[in-house]
């Protein structure tokens, strides 16, 4: 199988799969390949926090032109996966000199499948982009075509708890990956001081309590497959839920927009995590650390892409607030405005390249020490 992910999260996803029990785990670019049985496919879809899709490859062949593509798709016995009365859809990704249009590849592959059914039965299955019984993935890399069944359906970042979003919401898989990369495991208090619609808070609570990432999701594509085993799925889900653990610290969110706070509270409620998360209407720059001991902070400040702000002043205030009001804190935040990091006035101990959609970003870590280590607050412009 192949688990797709965002650039930068390959190592995190590989570790997730290994811990879940996957065999022969191998990292690629934006993907991790692995082996497992049908039950493990169900488990990976339910539990992987940093996977966008779980694909099951069924055929690979060389492809140099549209004739090869058509023949290769026709060489698969599609009656094993779908009946003439069912519907399918094809998603294609193309990195090839021979093909420059993924839509053309999808149409050619569709023709090959439809023609196969027509020749055998005189009828053809329908195409349904919204609710297909089978979602097929065609991936062409140079002259190699891989045909896979998409076991997930809609991207796995659609967790099922988010009904309300803000102007610039963060993707759930990106949020979970950042949290895991920051070392968050639920062993201290946590804060997101610019929480928006609450995605980072929700993912943080799910990690802290070891709740399966997609437990609130309404449907996976494999539930429409001919070999769907509802009993096996229930057993897998039950075994994952037995691993849920208690969390003995606090998870808190602030946002200065009352509308964001309402949305965040709704999403937290949908995820059944109200007992773990509190959200307040407050401006981060007016707040201070309220808990004793270490504090873990992860947030997604505005980049100035969709929100009109004075970036220099804004990032300087982030640095000042961290320095003056949050001793004993490990603070991480993501920004697509890489230049703006200079205004924070603190030297990051790590900067990791990630992508938020198509935006190249940096995920930066700042360590705020208590007391004697204040000499660590160094201005990068000095």
Image (cartoon, grey):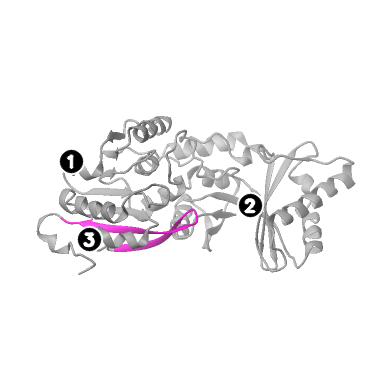
Q: Is residue 211 visible?
A: yes
Q: Position of residue 7 (x, y in %)?
A: 48, 59
Q: Can you tell which of label 1 and label 2 is closer to the viewer?
A: 1
Total of numbered circles in the picture?
3
Q: Could you say whether the residue bearing mark 1 is in a helix, strand or loop?
A: loop
Q: Earlier in the sequence, mark 2 or mark 3?
A: 2
**Residue 56 - label:** 2
**Contact check, label 2 and label 3, Cβ < 8 Å:** no
Q: Quadrant of the N terminus?
A: bottom right
For residue 356: magenta? yes
Q: Residue 261's quadrant in the figure? A: top left
Magenta region, residue range: 350-369
Of circles 1 and 3, which is in front?
Answer: 3
Please, what secondary structure does the residue beneath circle 3 have?
Answer: loop
Q: Position of residue 63 (x, y in %)?
A: 74, 65
**How many angstroms separate mark 2 from mark 3 (CA)?**
48 Å
Instruction: Name the front one of labels 2 and 3.
Output: 3
Mark 1 packing: few (<14 Cα in 10 Å), some, or many (20+)? few
Residue topped by disc 3 = 345
Identify the residue under disc 1: 290
Mark 1 or 3 closer to N-term? 1
Residue located 13% across and 60% down the image: 374
Q: Chief secondary structure of the magenta span? A: strand
Above or below 170: residue 63: below
């Amino acid at each position: 199988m192949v688990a797709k992910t965002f650039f930068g999260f390959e190592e995190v996803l590989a570790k997730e799969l290994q811990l879940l029990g996957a065999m022969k785990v191998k990292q690629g670019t934006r993907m991790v390949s692995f082996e497992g049985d049908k039950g493990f496919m169900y488990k990976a879809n339910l539990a992987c926090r940093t996977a966008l899709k779980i694909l099951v490859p069924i055929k690979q062949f060389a492809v140099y032109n549209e004739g090869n593509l058509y023949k290769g798709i026709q060489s698969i016995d599609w009656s094993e996966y779908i009946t003439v009365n069912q519907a399918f859809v094809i998603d294609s990704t193309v990195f090839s000199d021979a093909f420059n249009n993924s839509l053309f590849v999808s149409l050619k592959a569709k023709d090959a499948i439809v023609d196969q059914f027509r020749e055998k039965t005189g009828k053809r299955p329908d195409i349904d982009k919204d609710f297909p019984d089978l979602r097929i993935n065609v991936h062409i890399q140079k002259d190699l075509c891989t045909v896979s069944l998409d076991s997930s359906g809609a991207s796995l970042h659609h967790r099922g708890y988010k009904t309300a979003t803000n102007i610039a919401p963060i993707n759930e898989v990106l949020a979970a990956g950042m949290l895991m990369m920051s070392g968050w495991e639920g062993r201290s208090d946590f804060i997101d001081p610019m929480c928006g619609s609450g995605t980072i808070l929700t993912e943080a609570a799910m990690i802290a309590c070891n709740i399966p990432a997609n437990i609130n999701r309404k449907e996976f594509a494999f539930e429409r497959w001919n070999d769907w085993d509802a009993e096996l799925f229930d057993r897998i889900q039950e075994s994952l839920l037995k691993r849920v653990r208690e969390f003995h610290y606090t998870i808190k969110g602030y946002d200065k927009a009352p509308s964001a706070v309402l949305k965040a509270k709704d999403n937290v409620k949908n995820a059944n995590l109200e007992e773990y998360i509190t959200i307040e209407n407050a401006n981060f720059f007016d707040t201070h650390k309220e808990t004793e001991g270490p504090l873990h902070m992860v947030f997604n400040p505005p980049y100035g892409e969709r929100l009109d702000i004075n970036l220099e002043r804004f990032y300087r205030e982030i640095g000042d607030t961290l320095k003056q009001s949050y001793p004993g804190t490990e603070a991480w935040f993501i920004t697509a405005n890489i230049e703006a990091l200079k205004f924070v006035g603190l030297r990051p101990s790590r900067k990791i390249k990630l992508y938020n959609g198509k935006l190249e970003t940096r995920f930066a870590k700042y360590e705020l020490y208590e007391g004697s280590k204040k000499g660590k607050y160094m201005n990068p412009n000095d």
